[in-house]
């Protein structure tokens, strides 16, 4: 069970919220998750944790690229910058997620990958917008990197 300080809601709602946040915020949360996992990997000399952190870093880079493609070209305002029921910082959120058990961390990242895949499918299907296809490609790549985590444990 993932224990998130300052959060009052279900894990499914949290996963959806993090995956559906404004792209720069999602990238920041992923970056904190990866930073915390990297620190734990070096503290414990765990190559598996380093591999997991690398997958999360790569997903974060794809989200950053998605944000770059979206910024100023598309309306990304539907993506919120807050998580309903969460009153902490996004650093705390990323830290708490990264400090869960392997099983829970993999579950969280896998479900977040599902949500990014859902968004990518929706963007891909939108007609006439080449920028949407580029955005979708980055979201597909981010989801795939999060899915890789299940093979690193």
Image (tube, grey):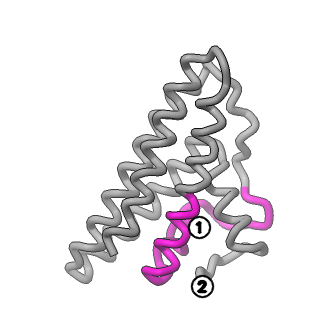
Picture quarter with the C terminus: bottom left
Q: Which residue is mark 1?
A: 93
> Label 1 crowding class (10 Å Cα cut-off): few <14, some 14-19, many 20+?
many
Where is residue 103 drawn, in percent x and y? Answer: 47, 81
- Work out whether 38 lies above or below 131: below
Furthest residue toward top? 128
From the viewer's perspective, is residue 42 above or below residue 136? below
Tell me if residue 45 is in the magenta stretch.
Answer: no
Percent of width and height locating residue 73: 61, 18
| Residue at the spot of label 2 | 1
Q: Nearer the viewer, residue 12 or 96?
A: 12
Residue nearer the viewer, 32 or 100: 100
The residue drawn where x is 62% and y is 82% is: 3
Question: Which residues are drawn in magenta?
Answer: 83-112
Vertical comparison of 141 with 31: above or below: above
Residue 151 x/y as whole percent: 34, 68
Residue 81: x and y in percent read 70, 47
Discs 2, 1 touching: Cβ within 8 Å:
no
In percent of the image, x 70 and y 26: which residue is there? 75
Residue at 53% from the left image edge and 56% from the top image edge: 113
Mark 2 residue element: loop
Q: Quadrant of the N terminus?
A: bottom right
Name the quadrant containing residue 92.
Answer: bottom right
Q: CA distance from mark 2 to mark 1?
A: 14 Å
Query: Magenta segment: does it hold 100?
Result: yes
Mark 2, other Cα within 10 Å: few <14 / some 14–19 / many ≥20: few
Q: Which mark is residue 32?
A: none
Camera-side residue of 90 and 150? 150
Q: Which residue is drawn at the image coordinates 64% and 14% (left, top)?
A: 128
Element carrying mark 1: helix
Q: Nearer the viewer, mark 2 or mark 1?
A: 2
């Amino acid at each position: 069970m993932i224990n998130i300080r300052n959060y009052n809601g279900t894990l499914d709602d949290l996963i959806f919220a993090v995956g559906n946040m404004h792209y720069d915020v999602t990238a920041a949360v992923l970056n904190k998750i990866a930073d915390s996992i990297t620190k734990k990997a070096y503290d414990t000399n765990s190559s598996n944790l380093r591999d997991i952190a690398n997958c999360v870093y790569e997903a974060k880079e794809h989200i950053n690229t998605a944000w770059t493609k979206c910024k100023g070209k598309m309306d990304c305002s539907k993506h919120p910058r807050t998580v309903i029921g969460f009153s902490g910082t996004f650093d705390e959120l990323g830290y708490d997620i990264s400090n869960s058990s392997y099983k829970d961390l993999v579950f969280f990242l896998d479900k977040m990958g599902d949500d990014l895949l859902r968004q990518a499918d929706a963007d891909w299907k939108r007609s006439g917008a080449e920028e949407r296809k580029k955005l979708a490609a980055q979201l597909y790549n981010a989801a795939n990197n999060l899915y890789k985590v299940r093979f690193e444990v």
